[in-house]
Amino acid sequence: MSEHIDSVLTETRVFPPPTAASVGMPRWHVASMQEYRALHRRSLDDPEGFWGEQARMLAWSRPWTRVLDWNPPDARWFVGGQLNACFNCVDRQVETGHGEQVAIVWEGEPVRAPSASAGSNTRNTSPVAGARGSDPEIRRLTYRDLQRETSRLGSALRSLGVKKGDVVTIYMPMVPELAVAMLACARIGAAHSIIFGGFAPHAIVERVIDAKSRVIITADGGYRRGEVVPLRKNVDEALTALGSAGHGVEHVITLQRTGTPTQDAAPGIRGSAPGFHDYHTLLDRANADCPCEAMDAEDMLFLLYTSGSTGKPKGIVHTTGGYMVYTTMTARLVFNLIPDAGQLFWCTADIGWVTGHSYVIYGILPGRVPTLMYEGAPNFPASDRFWDIIERHRVTQLYTAPTAIRTFMKWGQEWPRKHDLSSLQLLGTVGEPINPEAWVWYRDTIGGGRCPVVDTYWQTETGGHVISPLPGCTPTKPGSCTLPLPGIDAAVVNEQGEELPPNQGGLLVTRRPWPGMLRGIYGDRQRYVQGYWSRVKGPGGTALQSGGKNTGLETGAATPYYFSADGARRDQDGYFWIMGRVDDVINVSGHRLGTMEVESALVSHPAVAEAAVVGMPHEIKGTGICAFVTLKSGSGRKADDGLRKELAAHVAREIGALARPDSIRFAEGLPKTRSGKIMRRLLRDLAAGVEKITQDTTTLEDYSVLARLRETDE
Ligand code: PRX
């Protein structure tokens, strides 16, 4: 990678923070920049004091003896302490007398049109003129309900032999039972590995094997844009493949959501077939008494797979104490959560992504503010479904992705205009850089120009927000995630770890550990050390070497920096501007995708010899997927539109619809260096339609390839 990353974005607008009263908040947790600066300074000067204070906001069954034990790159937080994540989300609220308060407001996707006769059971899923007046299914679960349900499922899991430390795979739609399933795992000390319902059977197979998971909780299907997503069918396909791979799954629990018929046997399974259980039957028989397991702060809470720069997704490990402290603190400060103040927080992410883990469930429930879950698509039955939900439920904080905002802009402001959005107090975004135009549209059209916008930068690995405005104090600049949160020592550096002057692009690092940081990649120590701790040198030229027996540094030695794999710059005011990934990961609609994963899917098609995948600018998705493909000469297939469609469908089937390429370009050869490395930067320029290739092409092995590639437009 070159030392210098160019930054072209110039944005000069600054929006001061609104007063709490003007948005209807009782107060801001952090109300002035002076307060923020003092808090940030204190968190770095006295991290143990600061984090100890934050941790005391949770309930611990045994106090910690040390706040931090840092043996780079291994951090242990709240050493010796014990707590339970489900207890802090659920039981604690019941025990303090809030059991009857609503914890989760859930809305299903299907609606009955207003004309449908009352009491009719038939679901009319045909589009209506707008979502207003439609009649969706709504459920409200109190903390007591959650306590009962997580206890019953927890007992059921225990009776199936699930023990503390086991990994339970969850592949479900956005229904309350998904929240129950994850919290039930936490209750009994089993780690969960949630797989987003949009992923294909192959993704289930590789994650189940990697996690050594023996139990799967799923549903017959889920609703998405009026259609049924066949979740259980995908699990059945995965079970067959798992059987062939010699991996036995012992139990499959299926929730009936859509009424899709399922068979209690997956076809063609080799070896012993799993036990199949109906979710409700199992819970009806379960013991309602299921005490929360006392977990060590460093016990694994969950595994969440995310893409990296190889073809194999990595299982990011989060532990109980640090993650809970961090998500609870960041949710409270960034979203200004206040219990008993009439708030209803809505994060639109699926729980299958880290955003859903941290800010639908784990960071929100301890704050005792109800969290809204919506099952389906934003344009079902019409393009105003989100605004309709906000109006009907009186949502106060909305947290969504830039790609969604760009889609809403395209659909037009007439959809939000139909609705009363005056309940909104705060708007948040996450997942990718937001273009200033979308930021301003969000602020004005959705927030009525009143609400603060928090652009939160973070990653699966960071557990929670790391750079973000605090709504009551940070002046915001459209497109900038602004300043590091308390406890975060973020910087833009070169590979030597030297901090760069203002407005010069470089590598985004964090120079100290924080409680929410990942504790590793499941089963792959080397990838953890190499991916995050070896690239950028810390003070004194320290970077960890991967390989060998490197388990850390000598005590007292300089600390290596955590490398995010993002490029960024800091402006003259110290504001961070994220410039995107500098590895072979692309960010499609706010979702991380490894280009190698898409390449592997493409070359698994019989006609494909070689494939190279790069990102390209995309109006809605931020980054689209462009694939350069060479065909096997003997395959007998022609490079035509038919094959193009077939390959796109093949990738969607192998990985999931989110990986479907936006553009497939057939080529006779791919540009490579003499050592055989594909020159991706060159392909990126070609995909973006850059006329004049500025890349250094002197290492290109065969110049004619470049000329021919230019001719291969779609
Ligand atoms: O490139 C950054 C981008 O999303 C990546 C992390 O993706 P993932 O682990 O899937 O988590 C997404 C939700 C936290 C980062 O490396 N990213 C995330 N938030 C922002 C962002 N880029 C710019 N601005 C953001 N606010």
Image (spheres, rainbow, N blue to C red):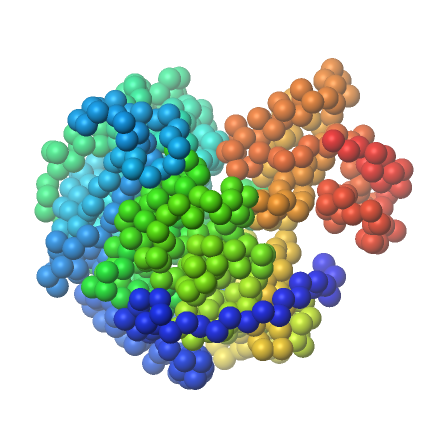
Frontmost residue, 191 versus 172:
172
**Identity of the residue drawn at 67% across and 45% down:** 616
- Give how far across and how far down residue 117 sits, in percent: 21, 25
- Give how far across and how far down residue 590 sits, in percent: 52, 49
- Give how far across and how far down residue 284 sits, in percent: 12, 34
Q: Is residue 492 visible?
A: no
**Identity of the residue drawn at 63% across and 53% down:** 583
Q: Horizontal placement of 352 versus 161: left or right?
A: right
Looking at the image, is 168 positioned above or below residue 96?
A: above
Res 171 quadrant in image? top left
Q: Is residue 344 visible?
A: yes
Position of the C terminus, as image quadrant, is: top right
Q: Horizontal placement of 242 versus 109: left or right?
A: right
All told, the count of numbered labels is 0
Frontmost residue, 483 versus 54:
483
Looking at the image, is 425 positioned above or below residue 27?
A: above
Position of the N terminus, as image quadrant, is: bottom right
Outermost residue toward the top in this view:
636
**Identity of the residue drawn at 72% across and 17% down:** 637
- Give how far across and how far down residue 477 sits, in percent: 55, 68
**Identity of the residue drawn at 35% across and 21% down:** 266
Frontmost residue, 429 versus 301:
429
Frontmost residue, 416 versus 504:
416
